[in-house]
Image: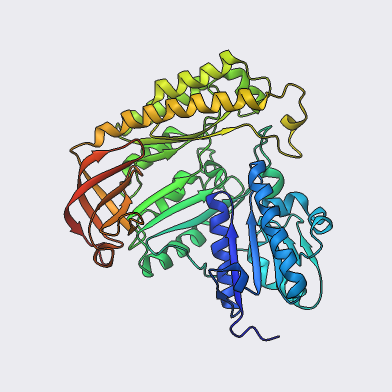
Amino acid sequence: MTTARRHYHITTFGCQMNKADSERMAGVLEDMGFEWSEDPNDADIILYNTCTIRDNAEQKVYSYLGRQAKRKHEKPDLTLIVAGCVAQQEGEALLRRVPELDLVMGPQHANRLKDLLQQVFDGNQVVATEPIHIMEDITKPRRDATVTAWVNVIYGCNERCTYCVVPNVRGVEQSRTPEAVRAEMEELGRQGYKEVTLLGQNIDAYGRDLPGVTPEGRHKHTFTDLLYYVHDVPGIERLRFATSHPRYFTERLIRACAELPKVCEHFHIPFQSGDNEVLKRMARGYTHEKYRRIIDTIREYMPDAAISADAIVGFPTETEAQFENTLKLVEDIGFDQLNTAAYSPRPGTPAALWDEQISEEVKSDRLQRLNHLVAIKAAERSQRYLGRIEEVLVEDQNPKDTTQVMGRTRTNRLTFFTGSINDLKGKLVKVKVTEVRAFSLTGEPLETRAAMAV
């Protein structure tokens, strides 16, 4: 079969892990000779990389699919693929609902896309959702950005939070070897990338499944050890990581972040609820007191560090008083950013079956109140930047004002300033902050530092 001048389009829903998976699958398709098409209606292969964390993301997938399924009746050689978490969860049920689909594949199978497509081109309808050992990344991802990149370090999750579908759809934890992670980062450094975000569903669990223990009896490969191992990769100026779990977040990791100059002072540590009873029903495995101690320790080592998190309101049985404990935690800690969501029952999770579900009206009211407080606290946190000089890594042009460029501070604050993207992309610029908003800054450039050539 020839693939000359055939096109593909990928639509990605959901988290950074999904975006990283999409980049790898795009890399596979380009290796096979397909070209990217901005317009799905010009594509011969359409791939939806799906998310099942929230119900509305799932519904959106079905509406997109419906349109392309109709198109397939006019263009029978169109190949339709659903990948990611909805694919893993629904499996063959997806084919019954949308018989025009050619391939349904779970997130663990992203690196197998070429083999699976070959089966489709041979005339088969394929479902790949069985648990497998994830193959090492053998493809070069087609990266969406040229300055910052994601690198997976651990796939899957062994936690059993009662609201979360991730362990069912992404499988058990599988860590990549430190050597494989470093090799990918070295290649990114050679290609001119300046910042890498190390990714894992539960990144602090990194290395638990790798062989070996130290004389002190701890795992030989922890996430902290990995940071020490990769922090000096030539060309990479900044390191970030996500997502952390309070249960495994150690002082040793905090100390490493303070010691290693390339690790940015930004921590994303979801707390989900500020009430111990709710945390227990969520099966999170920590108390709000432990969470507060982690943040206190971070601020002892790095007083200026930015803290972001995730929170859920309206979890089954959550009372008004328990919700107010979440508000109290947000008030006390003062997050730089908080991703908030009303609880959404997910198929196959214990909490979805509980009787004491909270009404949509109450969930919506609590979400609104929480978001209001988050914006107030974020605006307060932003005040500390006014008049300060911050180092900004320039990523792109400001889409709303083409005379400006935009990038992020080490603490992950989006920052805008006047300049030419052609001159400044990928550069580290000292910027004096002249204007602060809840979630972004504006400033004046002082000096530009090219990334160190090695």
Q: Can residue 171 be seen in this view?
A: no
| Image coordinates for residue 17, horizontal then vertical, percent | 56, 52
| Image coordinates for residue 413, horizontal then vertical, percent | 34, 43
In the displayed structure, 85 sits above or below 245; it is below
Of 48 and 335, the residue lying toward us: 48
The reply, left or right, for residue 92 in relation to residue 222 is: right
Coloured how? rainbow
How many labels were placed on the picture? 0
| Image coordinates for residue 77, horizontal then vertical, percent | 73, 77
* Residue at 58% from the left image edge and 54% from the top image edge: 18
* Residue at 81% from the left image edge and 76% from the top image edge: 123
Residue that protrudes farthest toward the right in the picture: 96
The reply, left or right, for residue 58 in relation to residue 216 is: right
In the displayed structure, 280 sits above or below 193; it is above
Among the 4 quarters of the image, the one containing residue 307: top left
Of 37 and 295, the residue lying toward us: 37
Among the 4 quarters of the image, the one containing residue 2: bottom right
The reply, left or right, for residue 357 in relation to residue 300 is: right
Q: In which quarter of the image is the N terminus?
A: bottom right
Of 301 and 145, the residue lying toward us: 145
| Image coordinates for residue 69, horizontal then vertical, percent | 74, 64
Among the 4 quarters of the image, the one containing residue 37: bottom right
Q: In which quarter of the image is the C terminus?
A: bottom left
In the displayed structure, 348 sits above or below 17; it is above
In the displayed structure, 397 sits above or below 288; it is below
Residue that protrudes farthest toward the left in the picture: 446
* Residue at 56% from the left image edge and 65% from the top image edge: 24
